[in-house]
Image: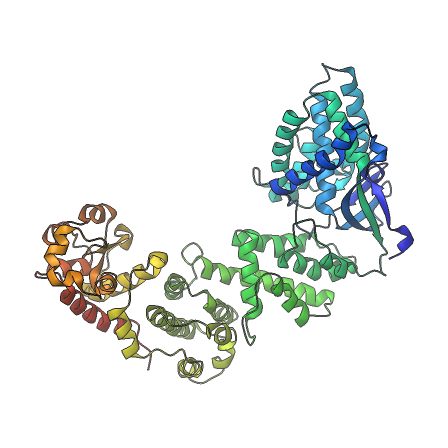
Amino acid sequence: MPTDQVKNRSFKELLTGTVRFKIPFFQRGYAWEKKQWEQLFLDLQEQVITELDAGSSPLEIQHFFGPVVVMEEAGVPELKEFLVIDGQQRITTVYLLLGIIREHLLTKKHLSVDATDYSKKLMKFISNDIETGDDYLHLKVFSSKGDRLPSYRVLFGTETNPKTPLLQTDLQAFVPGASKVEGFKKYADKKLKNDFPDVPSLWRLAQVLLQCLTIVWIPLSQGKDDSQAIFESLNDKGMPLTASELLCNYLFRPILDAKESPDQMHDDWWLSSIRLLGDNDNFEEYLRNLFSIGESKMVGKNRKVYVHFKTKHKMLSVASAKGQLAGIRAGVDQYRMILDPIGAPHEDEGITKLLISISQTRMESSTPFVLSVLQAHAANTLSVEKARAILSETTVLLVRRKMAELSTTAYDVMFPQLLSKVINEPNQILALHEQFRKHGVWVSDQEFSAAVETKSAYRTRDLPFARLLLIELDKAFQAFGQFPDYSTVPTIEHVLPQELNGDWLAYLGADASDEHLPQLIHTIGNLCLLSQPANSSAGQNPFTTKIAGYSEVTALARQIKNHPEPWDLAAIRSRSKNLAKAAVERWAWRN
């Protein structure tokens, strides 16, 4: 970059004339929050306003506000247009705050003749004075999607929509109440009302913003400077760029360099993916799982996702960038089936049921493998029968190992490349079993049975897994395959209560002092499913009183109702042993 052009500049210089600072559409939206807003006002008070109170003039005070990296673009003829590479949050905050100050001045024009004059002067820094059919050209800071509409309303004090070809796009992207622009408006309104309540203090604040805040102006030369490298190395104050933001910039850069319009692709392939997955955190976790498929181990979290992708794809052409974007979007549908198999079910009911079971094990390390299976089926390289069989064996593995409380360390190495190891084998299930043994994760019938008998099935931090065990075992004992609606029995009942009162201690006798009692209380033999009212009613009641209130909807509850007294540790061990046999059959390895 030409070093002679790097200089200190005030916001008054930045916003004078017909100019537009354009935020690239692929960058994050306005992201500052209360922490950053409070720090800005604190700095202004301590570093600038205190000096003004001591007699200094605005021209004598400079407060460094960070760098602003820009690249001049050829755009609308009437405007001098800059693409903001770094400094978006700073520019946007000051620009919005000037508009909010102007609005507060206008509300006080009946109190002071200066208010109207000051608001007119500020308008020159807020709005481009040009004749145009597109109201957005009046904006001197042209925000990204989702922020343009609320920014326009904040700056021009109107609830009416701007006349612009981008209106429909922005109406879809803007979520009322969720915009950080709206949040800043509420914060600034309260701050100005409390700390800058009159016309002189408002005008002084405006002058502080325009004249005393100093940025380092860093202009890049198009075609000479590596804007991507600078974009990666510079971060907004306290707001590091996320992996998805860096990746978005990287993927769309060759498309932009080729002078193609990427807006529709960004909507259809990128923004729609984030919306379908709910938020950026889910989207980044999806990218991590997607990029892990076929790798020797799971890709790391956060920025490691971006570093991994960039290392694998050092030179992106327009065609390859578009292919990657299309692939990312295509995998979202399968990932949603893993993330929320009930809300986004697979077209095959059997696969959906397996995905529900897998999700209830909460073994997220298996996700790259499960995703690769669903993608292979969607691409017609894996039949529905084979996909079911593979997912069924995966469920058996996850249930058995989770019940036995075995290490998951090997999962990060095994699962990402697992499908590639078995998909071309003539007997895929046999090949799958061989991989399980190779990685040391195989669980024998004996190990699984012993775990069901002795390990805690009730785990307060893992209740979905406990319910999975109980529901599937209950089904095994239901006659003629007629299953109840298990949503009517959502709670897990401890027959022997978790906390024993005096009556239960007396009832147990010597068992009350058995060292294994605390563990056995949570084993499968002491558990069943009840409705919420029945569970609450049972409490610490004596055994006979409890079972009288048990519903016969579930087979497991019926077993206990028919169990003769006493209900002691021997009874629990005996029932656990019987249920362990059923568990080995329910989660049996295929031959």
Inspect this view and state whether residue 76 appears. Answer: no
Give residue 437's position: percent from left, percent from top: 41, 82
For this orientation, the residue located farthest to the bottom is 426
- In this view of the protein, which residue sits in the foreground, 496 or 113? 496
Residue at figure coordinates x 80%, y 44% from the top left: 215
Residue at figure coordinates x 84%, y 51% from the top left: 219
- Picture quadrant where residue 323 is located: bottom right
Give residue 345's position: percent from left, percent from top: 42, 58
Q: Is residue 230 above or below residue 403?
A: above
Is 484 placed left or right of 292 in the picture?
left
Residue at figure coordinates x 10%, y 56% from the top left: 507
For this orientation, the residue located farthest to the front is 54
Give residue 383's position: percent from left, percent from top: 45, 74
Q: How many numbered discs sit on the rendered protein? A: 0
Query: Which quarter shows the C terminus?
Result: bottom left
- In this view of the protein, which residue sits in the foreground, 520 or 357? 520
- In this view of the protein, which residue sits in the foreground, 149 or 297? 297
- Picture quadrant where residue 165 is located: top right
Inspect this view and state whether residue 161 appears. Answer: yes
Query: Which quarter shows the N terminus?
Result: bottom right
- Picture quadrant where residue 306 is located: bottom right
